[in-house]
Image (spheres, rainbow, N blue to C red):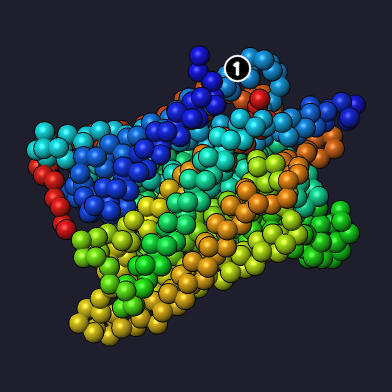
Amino acid sequence: MFNVRKLAWVGFAFMLTGTALVAVMIILNEASVLYTFYPPLAAHPFFYVGLVLLVLGIWACCFGVFINYSHWRKAHRGQPTPLLAFFAMGVFVLWFFASIGITIEVLTLIPWSMGLVETTNVMVGRTLFWWFGHSLVNIWYLVAASVWYVVVPKLIGGRHFNEKLIKLVVILLVILNIPGGFHHQIVDPGISLSIKYLHVFMSLAIAVPSLMTAFAMFAVFERAGRRLGGKGLLGWLKKLPWGDVRFLAPMIAMIAFIPGGAGGIVNTSNQLNQVIHNTLWVVGHFHVTVGMSVVMTFFGICYWLVPYLAKRRLTAKMNRLGVIQTIIWTVGMVLMAGSQHAAGLLGDPRRTSFTTYGDHSTALSWIPYEYVMGMGAVLLLIGVLIQVYAVFHMMFFAPKGETEFPVAEAEDGAAPAPMWTERWGLWIVLLLMVVAMAYVVPIMDFILNAPPGSPPIKTW
Amino acid sequence: MEQARTEPIRQTSKKALGINQKDAKVSLSYLTVAFVSLLIGGILGLLQGLERSGLLELPTGVNGTWHFITRCFFHYFYDWLSVCCSFAFFRGPVV
């Protein structure tokens, strides 16, 4: 009755309607609630209905994949799940459990925004938002990591790293992810120091699979480079296909994850967070992590996935354009994110319109960095235009033909991952236990010791 | 022996080539929305930049929300593309 493709189309319809509804409400100035839509900022009820439809669309895709996976397991008993599909399962499991938080939040905000309920609990709303918000970024990251582990080794003529380690990384990212959201609230009132300490620890736990990824990927690069004749300490680097956009874009994305991860550790640490909280440093951080690590991987994927799906070929000319786009994007993002980090350290606030605070000397010192951000933004816009052109060209106008779906194989003689890695039921139970550990005490505290709730507020 | 142990994985990677046209259409639809969103986000970002540099005056009714719209469309790009990729990556090997 339900198959994965039908549910994906149902999801498409829901997501498209939700996307349109949210966008229209914002354009009509009926949803001036900023990106995080923290209560007590209130939007038109249709804004929240649009968000519900977006989540329902995602859930339709999740259920389709879960049903398909369960059928596949029954038909392939004793076989390990192919790596890419294992990653995709991790992505959809995380989508589902991460979006539960925001679903509860939005369902409480709808009657509040309609005036049926007078007040809402602001702290519960913020906490439920970040239950989802931080995991969402890691959902995108997990998609990017799947390409780093499984596709990139094939593109460089290598083999993927140990399958057991890769599946362990996926499992850890799925189990440990959701509590990471709390570090966004590290300066919030009403949360005890012990809970904040617990959350610093739980957020930093994400660094473990990330460091495993860094080690594994550079081992893959070195092995492949040496197999191709690279000598000396770093001679293998020269053997990598730097002129192939399918490799170049995700490779720069991976390199960007080093400063991105280091910045993430700063954001997560209680004391260091006090210095950079709500400054442009944070904006710079997600330009490095999302704007480079995730987006550049997504761009790299397009150069083989789009022609593969559209039954066309990647031409040498398009590859060259892709390399140029990658360089433009990298320079733009380095200018943008670098100056945001620097300005943030000098105290430049985020979520604030431009002001010189009455020509205060500190505020004036931010202006040169803001010029650099503008230069970066211009380059990024050029990058967007080239990338959109490249994608639609490859979809409709590139020469017809077959393109490879590049999936790396294991090293000769490598053992497949043990079957315990396939126990998704167990990983979900552990995920729920970690979520309970992180959220039950603070949320109960917010509810039982709640201050008077807030009525809806519209600022402009 | 070694050949036998690696065989299932080789089969897996061959299967990954087997995504069918109907699945491809689903993925391409998600991908199209993602890149249209990216384009809209980019254009809105340009308008915002022109407005801030004093080269363009935007209608006052929507003035305060432009940066938010820009961010939303970039956000749509990530969401739609991550679903597209995960669907294709799942359906590739698990047919």
Residue drawn at (31%, 39%), measured in percent from left and top? A50
**How many marks do you count on the picture?**
1
Above or below A237: residue A33: above
User: Would you say residue A157 is visible in this rendering?
Assistant: yes
Q: For label 1, count other residues whose C-alpha is less than 10 Å away and answer few (under 14), some (14-19) or many (20+).
A: few
Residue in the image at 28% along x and 72% along y? B57
> Looking at the picture, how far across and down is residue A97, in whole percent?
42, 32
**Side of A453 relative to B67 (left or right):** left
Numbered disc 1: what chain? Answer: A
Give the quarter of the image for residue A169.
top right
Q: Is residue A392 above or below residue B46?
A: above
B57 is higher (above) or lower (below) than B72: below
Residue A151 appears in the picture as rendered: no
Question: Which residue is nearer to you in this view: A459 or A303?
Answer: A303
Instruction: Give the SS element for disc 1.
Output: helix
Query: Residue A137, percent across and down?
Result: 46, 48
- Position of residue A110 relative to residue A358, above or below, is above
A460 displayed left or right of A73:
left
| Residue drawn at 20 percent across, 44 percent down | A44
The residue under label 1 is A71
Q: Position of residue A228 (x, y in %)?
A: 87, 56
* Mark 1 residue type: His
Can you say which quadrant of the picture contains the N terminus of chain B? Answer: top right
Q: Quadrant of the C terminus of chain B?
A: top right
Front position in the image: B62 or A436: B62
Residue A73 image position (x, y, % from top left): 63, 19
